[in-house]
Image: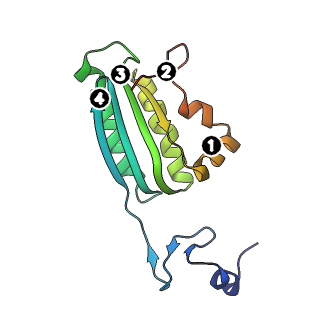
Amino acid sequence: MSSSPRDICDQPPGRTPGGPAIHSSGTTAMEALHLTTTERGHTITIAVSGELDISTIDQLREHIRRIVQTARIRHDVPRYDCHVHVDLDGLSFVDASGLGALIAIHTNAHDRGVALAFTRIPAHLHRILTITGLHEHLTSPPANRPPPTS
């Protein structure tokens, strides 16, 4: 069932059903994706904030791909002894393409022998991951490996 113009106008400022963020002035806003990377021992943490959608997934994929590609070489450690934590607490929105990107990022890291886990999952994303059965898969270390230490 689609929303009539009256339904959308009656909603508080913010996101319209299935649409981009709307400011109270009526203009759309595309919130940028911000990435901050820190490294401590064999653990690399990437803090992600903003919106993860079709317009920002390539930025996240490329950033994490570069880190995962060089992580084990830079640290010269065995498979899964280099850990990448992707802190998602700052994400304000994730669409279907963003969810697909998270799955692809996790798979790529695992294939390269890097233990990657998504941490500090915001409530809106936690619900989606739980419903889809992806929560444990995306937030747990690889099978038979101890959890990463900070």
Residue 147: which numbered mark, if any?
A: 2
Q: What's the residue type where badge 2 is placed?
A: Pro
Q: Earlier in the sequence, mark 3 or mark 4?
A: 4
Q: Position of residue 30 (x, y in %)?
A: 42, 68
Residue 97: which numbered mark, if any?
A: none
Q: Earlier in the sequence, mark 3 or mark 1?
A: 3
**Front: mark 4 or 1:** 4
**Is the residue marked by circle 2 packed among few (<14), some (14-19), or many (20+) residues within 10 Å?**
some
Q: What's the residue type where badge 4 is placed?
A: Arg
Residue that numbered label 1 is attached to: 129
Q: Could you tell me which secondary element the residue under label 3 belongs to?
A: loop
**Front: mark 1 or 2:** 2
Measured in 3D between alpha carbons, the distance from the residue under mark 3 to the one under mark 4, in whole angstroms, is 11 Å
Q: Position of residue 96 (x, y in %)?
A: 57, 53
Measured in 3D between alpha carbons, the distance from the residue under mark 1 to the one under mark 2, in whole angstroms, is 20 Å
Residue that numbered label 4 is attached to: 40
Measured in 3D between alpha carbons, the distance from the residue under mark 4 to the one under mark 1, in whole angstroms, is 28 Å
Q: Earlier in the sequence, mark 2 or mark 4?
A: 4
**Image height of 15 relative to 75, above or below:** below
Residue at position x 51%, y 24% in the image: 141
Measured in 3D between alpha carbons, the distance from the residue under mark 2 to the one under mark 3, in whole angstroms, is 11 Å
Residue 82: which numbered mark, if any?
A: 3
Q: Earlier in the sequence, mark 1 or mark 2?
A: 1
- Horizontal arrangement in the rendering, residue 71 relative to residue 95 (left or right): left
**Image height of 94 relative to 76, above or below:** below
- Horizontal arrangement in the rendering, residue 43 relative to residue 50 (left or right): left
**Is the residue marked by circle 1 packed among few (<14), some (14-19), or many (20+) residues within 10 Å?**
some
